[in-house]
């Protein structure tokens, strides 16, 4: 009996060890995302952040398919744009909106792999936040200029907007999505109910985000712990050298009824 138990234990341990080192089996969309991540249009610095930002897992969580009509909000330097564009180039559409003039629009004109990216004809106009806080912006009511989208995404931008601007943004996204469409938000985590300070202003309370997005008519669908960082104390400014690249972030998924 003892020999049987030992043999069973050895077989079990061997199976676990084998499973631990088995390569992850990718879905078809996962393979497309991974291929886009290896693209030459991405810089070495951009690729170096893949381990921290987990773009494949994040986009899979938001339900990306290669035949979707997708809009990326406030794409900044195009870190995610360069991954989304190749995935959607053949069967889908990628639109970008708000703050695109400085980096994304010139990039679209000069990088062939981004030639199919469309700049949404939005009438959104950033305004300086009251009090002149650097990095915070206001937005009056606006439209994104596109309709019947399947997926709208924004990555680490929500915190840059005032409460009024966030409400305007959420209403505009709701109007642009088709019924059943998904709204995905990733941002740096703030402690629940903590008042804004000079240290935490670039963090967002995820509970507050859920309440704000629901107020625009969305249904909260799911959250992910992909970007959970246990040693981020949620205390410090996200740009500190001891914190940057190692912040706890939430990923929230909403649906338009």
Image (cartoon, rainbow, N blue to C red):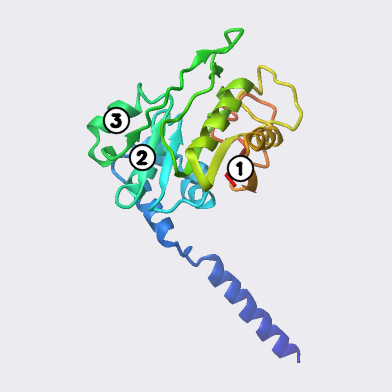
Quadrant (top left, top right, bottom left, bottom right) of the N terminus: bottom right
Q: Position of residue 49 (x, y in %)?
A: 46, 39
Q: Which mark is residue 35?
A: none
Query: In the image, what residue occupies the spot 49% across and 67% down?
Result: 22
Q: Nearer the viewer, residue 5 or 219?
A: 219
Provide the secondary structure element on which disc 1 rests. Answer: strand
Q: Which mark is residue 82?
A: 2
Asked if residue 238 shows in the view, the reply is no
Q: Nearer the viewer, residue 126 or 228?
A: 126
Q: Nearer the viewer, residue 17 or 84?
A: 84
Q: Position of residue 66 (x, y in %)?
A: 38, 53
Query: In the image, what residue occupies the spot 71% across and 89% down?
Result: 3
Compared to residue 189, the image places residue 57 above or below, namely below
Mark 2 Cα shell of 10 Å, populated few (<14), some (14-19), many (≥20): many
First reached walking from the N terminus: tag 3 or tag 2: 2
First reached walking from the N terminus: tag 1 or tag 3: 3
Provide the secondary structure element on which disc 2 rests. Answer: helix
Residue assigned mark 1: 252
| Image marks 3 and 2: residues in contact by CB distance under 8 Å | no
- Counting the numbered discs, the total is 3
Residue assigned mark 3: 107
| Image marks 1 and 2: residues in contact by CB distance under 8 Å | no
Name the quadrant containing residue 117. top left
First reached walking from the N terminus: tag 1 or tag 2: 2
Q: Position of residue 227 (x, y in %)?
A: 59, 43
């Amino acid at each position: 009996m003892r020999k049987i138990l030992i043999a069973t234990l050895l077989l079990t341990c061997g199976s676990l060890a084998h499973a631990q080192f088995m390569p992850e089996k990718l879905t078809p969309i996962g393979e497309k995302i991974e291929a886009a991540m290896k693209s030459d249009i991405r810089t070495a610095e951009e690729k170096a952040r893949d381990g921290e930002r987990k773009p494949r897992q994040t986009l899979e969580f938001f339900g990306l398919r290669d035949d979707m009509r997708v809009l990326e909000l406030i794409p900044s330097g195009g870190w995610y744009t360069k991954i989304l564009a190749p995935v959607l180039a053949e069967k889908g559409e990628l639109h970008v909106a708000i703050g695109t003039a400085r980096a994304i629009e010139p990039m679209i004109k000069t990088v062939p792999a981004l030639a199919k990216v469309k700049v949404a004809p939005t009438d959104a106009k950033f305004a300086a936040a009251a009090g002149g806080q650097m990095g915070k912006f206001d937005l009056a009511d606006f439209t994104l200029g596109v309709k019947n989208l399947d997926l709208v995404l924004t990555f680490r931008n929500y915190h840059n907007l005032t409460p009024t601007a966030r409400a305007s943004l959420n209403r505009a996204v709701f109007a642009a999505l088709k019924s059943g469409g998904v709204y995905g938000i990733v941002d740096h985590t703030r402690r629940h109910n903590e008042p804004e300070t000079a240290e935490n202003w670039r963090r967002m309370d995820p509970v507050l985000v859920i309440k704000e997005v629901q107020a625009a008519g969305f249904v909260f669908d799911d959250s992910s712990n992909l970007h959970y960082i246990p040693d981020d104390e949620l205390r410090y400014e996200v740009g500190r050298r001891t914190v940057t690249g190692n912040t706890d972030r939430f990923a929230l998924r909403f649906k338009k009824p």
